[in-house]
Image (tube, rainbow, N blue to C red):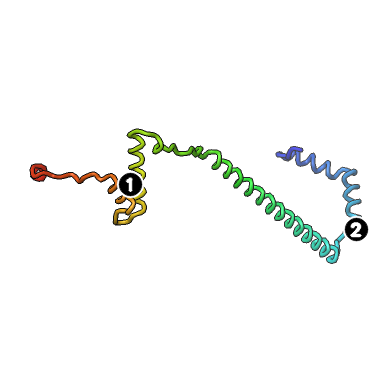
Amino acid sequence: MSQPTDSTNMKQLDEALNSPGQLGVRQLVGQLPEDVPNLVWRSRLNERLAQSQQQSRRRRLVLRVKWGGFAATAGLAATMGLILLSRPAITPALDVSQEPGIEAAMITAHREADSAMDVSSATVSESFVAHRSKAETPPFQWSEADLEAL
């Protein structure tokens, strides 16, 4: 129903409200006994409402905990799956030292020197010295001309 904006609409509404049908309804409603709920009834109603609210809170909390744990577990599983699937495949190292050739000799020498450096601290490893003594390569002899050039 639209709101009246001018005085003619207000007059029409007043006339409609003062009609005999509206006056009869007004009289019937006025004759009804006033029903005021007593305080005991209202207190019981409040207790029931508080109890149902606590139960619904508990249910919501239980659902949150259950679904929260499920979501955390699913997230962890998905993360672990992604980590495991995205890792590059580990291929076994090719043992070149078994093959003859200069490459094998270079790799073997590098591995021995590297392991000697890992094992020793400030001194040379005994295994490295023993390996070098087997080869018995004479130390380089510097000549006077070489020393003067430095």
Of the two numbered discs 2 and 1 on the same chain, state the one appearing first in sequence.
2
Residue 114 locus on image (x, y percent): 35, 47
Q: Quadrant of the C terminus?
A: top left
Residue 17 visible from this viewpoint: yes
Q: Is residue 62 above or below residue 143?
A: below
Rate crowding at label 2 as few (under 14), some (14 to 19) or many (20 or more) other CA atoms within 10 Å. few
Marking on residue 113: 1
Residue 144 left/right relative to 61: left
User: Which is more toward the observer, 73 or 43?
Assistant: 73
Dividing the picture into quarters, in which one does residue 79 lie?
Answer: top right
The residue lying toward the viewer, choosing from 68 and 124, is: 124
In the image, 43: left or right of 63?
Answer: right
Element class at badge 2: loop
Tell me the quarter of the picture where residue 53 sits: bottom right
Total marks placed = 2
Q: Foreground mark, 2 or 1?
A: 1
Disc 2 to disc 1, how far (Cα)?
Answer: 108 Å
Q: In terms of depth relative to the viewer, which is nearer, 15 or 57?
A: 57
State the residue position of label 2: 33
Residue at 88% x, 54% y: name it: 30
